[in-house]
Image (cartoon, rainbow, N blue to C red):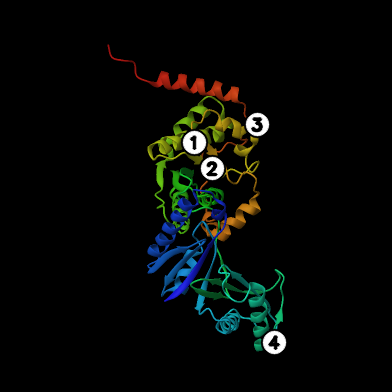
Amino acid sequence: MGLILLRYGELALKGRNRGDFTRQLRRNVRACLRANAIEGEVTQVEQRIYVRTAQVEEALEPLSRVFGLTSLSAVAEVERDIDAVVAEIVNQARLAGVGPDVRFRVRARRSDKTFPHISPEINRMGAEAVSRAMGCTIDLSDNAAVTVGVEVSRNGVMVYGRVVPAPGGLPVGVSGRVVALISGGIDSPVAAWMMMKRGCSVIPLHFSQSEVETSKALANVEVLARFSYGWELRPTVLAYAEAIAPQVRRVCDLGEQRWACVMCKRTMLLKACEVADELNAHAVVLGDSLGQVASQTLANMEVISHGIPKPIHRPLIGLDKAEITAIARRIGTFDISTQDAAACPYLPAHPLTQGKVDKLQEITRAIEEMEQSDEPSPER
């Protein structure tokens, strides 16, 4: 059996409710192991979480996608004996690729002050042993290519030479539910991922306008599910032709074609709020980036958001396209999102960029009058 050390970041700063956050994190770690057919025991000692498993290498990659974790390491357990500790430091340095041309350092953390050697002494003895064995250079700065870590506790000593980064953030499930609009494009899956990073349980909502875009959206939901341990992503798919198109056509019938994109987005938000009410979600998530397209100008965002009954979160609002694309590549949605796209049939030649709320209200009243005139007269 091997041991994996899991580290978390901002959870350590929580107050009396820290236990609720770490409890959810342990649940999500167990969910990750189950989802990847890995048998293991999850425990916590003070501010460290551990996974004991015979499938250490298989577990590292999926665990690195668990929100709330900042990093993880496969560790070697040794006796509380300085000679054994130094020998394992040399071994872990060798496994991490330390050689004559690789600069390294040793960093010890001694939580048990009864251990007879203080942290700087462990660092010095371990680094000197590695340098003698491999002829390499000690580098105490953050520029060191390899850091061999040592953690000393009452139960023993752990040594590791590899640190696998994890996404950080909060455990999925601690921040409540949100409905995230998911299209076939680049931005919306990234927005959903960022809300998951802040601990949200995401309910994907897609308005199906073509088989191509729906296929892309659902494929991206499958990618996002690889990060959503502890919460199952169950996408809701509504037909665009039924939920959105009638309202957009009415806008065009009024001769306000330039308003098509604004009214389309606004109608989507209203439908998303209905889904949120049905599924006990608290907010709606959009992939908007300020100024990126016509519907995402500040004026149009004001119009689109006017009177929407749920909070609207736009986690990409201050990112540019290059930054959003970089995240999409990193999480694995970019290639799916950039496959062949189907054009929207209602896209106007000159979309509105500076909408006004009073004009919105005027158009809304006109649409209501159209709908009332379309209703059949009551039977006498």
Local SS, label 3: loop
Q: Is the C-beta separation of discs 3 and 2 under 8 Å?
A: no
Residue 316 visible somewhere in the drawing: yes
Considering the numbered disc 2 on the image, is that residue within a helix, a strand or a loop?
loop
Q: Earlier in the sequence, mark 4 or mark 2?
A: 4
Q: Look at mark 2 in the image and give the residue it sits on.
A: 286
Q: Tell which of 192 and 265 is nearer to you.
A: 192
| Numbered disc in front, either 3 or 4 | 4
Q: Position of residue 306 (x, y in %)?
A: 55, 29
Separation (CA) of disc 2 from disc 1: 9 Å
The residue labelled by disc 1 is: 269
Farthest residue, direction left: 380
x and y percentages locating residue 364 in the rendered image: 51, 23
The spot of residue 103 in percent (x, y) is 70, 78
In the shown orientation, is residue 127 left or right of residue 231? right
Q: CA distance from mark 3 to mark 1?
A: 19 Å
Q: Nearer the viewer, mark 3 or mark 2?
A: 2
Query: Could you say which is closer to the camera, residue 33 or residue 83?
Result: 83
